[in-house]
Image (cartoon, rainbow, N blue to C red):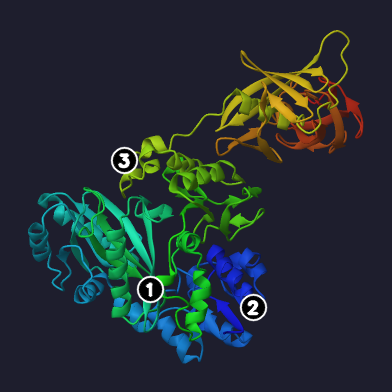
């Protein structure tokens, strides 16, 4: 076994590999870009080497620099993770030429499966079922159109060197073929530098089912299937194992086909054989076809690990070190059901646009496997995939595992960036998905209902108000003195840029009445905690003026600084007054000072927050009427400017 390996990747997969390496007693070396200096994978490794700028081309794709880092640190092998250089045969050749071991398949195996058309020809020879289509070299548009007609519409145009849905177009009739072909080729050239395409029969009710394989160069086994049909724009969202509705006959047929594929190229290491399945009449052994083989570890590998009890990274290291397969097919069996959900920093209402932000708060529930490359306080970088974590659950049955996933998502707390958490939660409640009736078009068909943004109810808004006023942890916060009636305070917050006002009446004894328009919410402190109208209050986090309430996958509010707003609006423009009681924290001007509109004149502390009081107009300070450290009442004049004619008011 190796004593030290270098992980040529970042994020959650780098952390995942390092976890297993540590359990095996193997030392690890991380590589990192400028953007990843403080990243989790760097902190986890025994050693770390800087390899360049934040762009992947300047760091994680620099083959010579990565190999030099491995040699300089004494690493004996390189694990590529997934993405970046994981399926680059030139990198494999360079690693081996440097006297190092590539933890993955041979360059020949990667090349054999690298181009979809060549791979499908190879699979046909190996006896693996292939989707009816044209995979030839003739790329003349008229010839391709003729082949599409012969196959029968609808068809799928796919870039030969494609991946991730790029260079892929569905065509339902002959009249749309030419335009779709041109569009697919244009996208393929930009993405892969290759405009060659293939034509395939489009499966009407497709399911994406893939089989995990493992080989040692001589023998191969499969570790059963994963269903990856829940996709958005050809990107997987939630994966599960085993596939719902799978029959023993079809599982045996798919497993046999996947093993044939691996043996046909003398495969060594972890790989995934992806199949497209026609589920229009259920799962039948004669209705699945080879799509492609991914010659690396997959993002969704944890669900296979959960149902088999096999650590796939452990197997990868053992095979790369020259050992035989740790187990034969008869020793592998399925135990229960597992789901994986991919949590991303992305703006769902804006079309799932990738998002950035600092993770002010990040918390996951106990009893859930979380594969993540970030921690609370980390920043989601614009340079890389915005994945926050993969949440993985496992139970004895599919229905229980799905309930576990729904609960895990509901109890996950994220603040500091928008996420797809609510979208994932909606998927776990989708009737079709719950029933196991899945296909690759499910999300697109029901996208509108799956992306409805819930509105915070009055109890959620009331909770945000209490957090803003620091009345959650301190039930008897100093609320002031009143002779004849309870003290009432007003506060303004925003949700989704829309303002709302709340009046809070402090009744004493940990009892507060929050008026939101005509709606009353009663907040009471008990030994068991805070309740809102009798219900237990949700969790929360506050970062400066940002408040997150963790209910229904999270609502995020901002506190309006009424003093900043009012500071330049009090009195006649000459007087800067305190709009509410507070402590004068500091004074920033003196009589005779010239000031401009917007300049900070003083800072008032109220409700444990500091608020700047600013000049409404240009002018000259006539008088300073308060001292730093003094307590003032609402309306008290703090600073007076000379009037417009130059005389003191």
Q: Which residue corresponds to the image point at 62% horizontal and 49% vertical from the top-left? A: 364
Q: What percent of the width, then of the height, locates residue 139? A: 15, 69
Residue 51 image position (x, y, % from top left): 57, 76
SS label for mark 2: loop
Q: Is residue 466 above or below residue 252?
A: above
**Mark 3 → mark 2, Cα distance in angstroms:** 48 Å
Residue 617 visible in rendering: no
Which of the two discs, 1 and 2, sits closer to the camera?
A: 1
What residue would you read off at disc 2?
A: 25
Q: Is residue 378 above or below residue 454?
A: below
Crowding near pointer 3: few (<14 within 10 Å), some, many (20+)? few
Q: Quadrant of residue 551?
A: top right
Q: CA distance from mark 3 to mark 1?
A: 37 Å
Q: Residue at x 12, y 64 (%)?
A: 144
Spot occupied by residue 383 in the image (x, y as percentages of width and height):
52, 61
Q: Earlier in the sequence, mark 3 or mark 2?
A: 2
Left or right, 215 with reference to 481: left
Between marks 1 and 2, how big is the CA–CA gap? 26 Å
Q: Element type at marker 3? A: helix
Q: Name the side, left or right, on which 28 lies relative to 236.
A: right
Is residue 432 in view?
yes
Q: Residue 221, labelled with which disc? A: 1
- To which residue does mark 3 refer? 445
User: Toward which corner of the image does residue 590 lie, by quadrant?
Assistant: top right
Front position in the image: 542 or 605: 542
Q: Nearer the viewer, residue 486 or 591?
A: 486
């Amino acid at each position: 076994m190796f004593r030290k390996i270098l992980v040529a990747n970042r994020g959650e997969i780098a952390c995942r590999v390092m976890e297993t390496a540590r359990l095996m007693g193997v030392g690890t070396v991380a590589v990192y870009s400028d953007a990843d200096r403080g990243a989790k994978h760097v902190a986890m490794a025994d050693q770390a080497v800087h390899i360049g700028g934040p762009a992947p081309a300047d760091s994680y794709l620099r083959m010579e620099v990565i190999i030099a880092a491995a040699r300089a640190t004494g690493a004996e092998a390189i694990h590529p993770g997934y993405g970046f250089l994981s399926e680059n045969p030139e990198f494999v050749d360079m690693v081996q030429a440097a006297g190092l071991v590539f933890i993955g398949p041979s360059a020949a195996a990667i090349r054999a499966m690298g181009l979809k058309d060549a791979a499908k020809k190879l699979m046909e020879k190996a006896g693996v079922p292939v989707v009816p289509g044209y995979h030839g070299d003739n790329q003349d548009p008229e010839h391709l159109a003729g082949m599409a007609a012969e196959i029968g519409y609808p068809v799928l145009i796919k870039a030969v060197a494609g991946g991730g849905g790029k260079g892929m177009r569905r065509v339902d009739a002959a009249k749309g073929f030419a335009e779709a072909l041109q569009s697919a080729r244009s996208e393929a050239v930009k993405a892969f530098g290759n405009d060659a395409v293939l034509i395939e029969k489009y499966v009407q009710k497709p399911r994406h089912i893939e089989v995990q394989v493992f080989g040692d160069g001589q023998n191969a086994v499969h570790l059963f299937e994963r269903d990856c049909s829940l996709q958005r724009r050809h990107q997987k969202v939630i994966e599960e194992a085993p596939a719902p509705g799978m029959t023993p006959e079809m599982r045996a047929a798919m497993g046999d086909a996947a093993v044939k594929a691996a043996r046909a190229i003398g495969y060594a290491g972890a790989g995934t054989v992806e199949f497209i399945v026609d589920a229009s009449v259920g799962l039948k052994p004669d209705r699945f076809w080879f799509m492609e083989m991914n010659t690396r570890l997959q993002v969704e590998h944890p669900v296979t690990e959960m149902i088999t009890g096999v650590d796939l990274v452990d197997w990868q290291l053992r095979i790369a070190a020259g050992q035989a397969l740790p187990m034969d097919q008869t020793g592998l069996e399925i135990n229960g059901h597992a789901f994986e959900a991919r949590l991303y920093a992305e703006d769902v209402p804006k079309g799932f646009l990738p998002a950035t932000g600092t993770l002010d708060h990040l918390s996951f529930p106990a009893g859930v496997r979380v594969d993540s490359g970030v921690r609370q306080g980390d920043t989601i970088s614009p340079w890389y995939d915005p994945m926050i974590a993969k949440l993985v659950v496992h139970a004895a049955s599919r229905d229980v595992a799905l309930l576990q996933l729904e609960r895990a998502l509901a109890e996950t707390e994220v603040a500091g960036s928008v996420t797809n958490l609510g979208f994932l939660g909606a998927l776990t409640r989708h009737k079709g998905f719950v029933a196991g009736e899945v296909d690759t078009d499910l999300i697109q068909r029901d996208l509108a209902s799956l992306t409805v943004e819930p509105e915070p109810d009055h109890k959620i808004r009331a909770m945000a108000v209490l957090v803003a006023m620091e009345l959650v942890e301190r039930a008897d916060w100093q609320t002031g003195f009143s002779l004849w009636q309870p003290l009432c305070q007003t506060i303004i917050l925003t949700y989704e840029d829309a303002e709302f006002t709340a009046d809070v009446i402090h009744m004493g004894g940990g009892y507060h009445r929050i008026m939101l328009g005509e709606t009353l919410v009663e907040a009471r402190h008990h030994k068991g905690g805070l309740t809102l109208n009798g219900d237990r209050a949700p969790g929360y986090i506050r970062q400066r003026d940002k408040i997150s309430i963790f209910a229904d996958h999270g609502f995020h509010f901002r506190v309006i600084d009424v003093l900043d707003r009012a500071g330049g609006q009090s009195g006649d423009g000459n007087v800067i007054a305190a709009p509410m009681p507070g402590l004068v924290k500091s004074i920033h001007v003196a009589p005779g000072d010239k000031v401009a509109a917007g300049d900070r004149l003083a800072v008032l502390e109220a409700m444990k927050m500091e608020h700047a009081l600013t000049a409404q107009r240009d002018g000259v300070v006539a008088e300073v009427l308060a001292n730093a450290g003094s307590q003032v009442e609402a309306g008290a004049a703090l600073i007076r400017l000379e009037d417009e004619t130059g005389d003191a008011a």
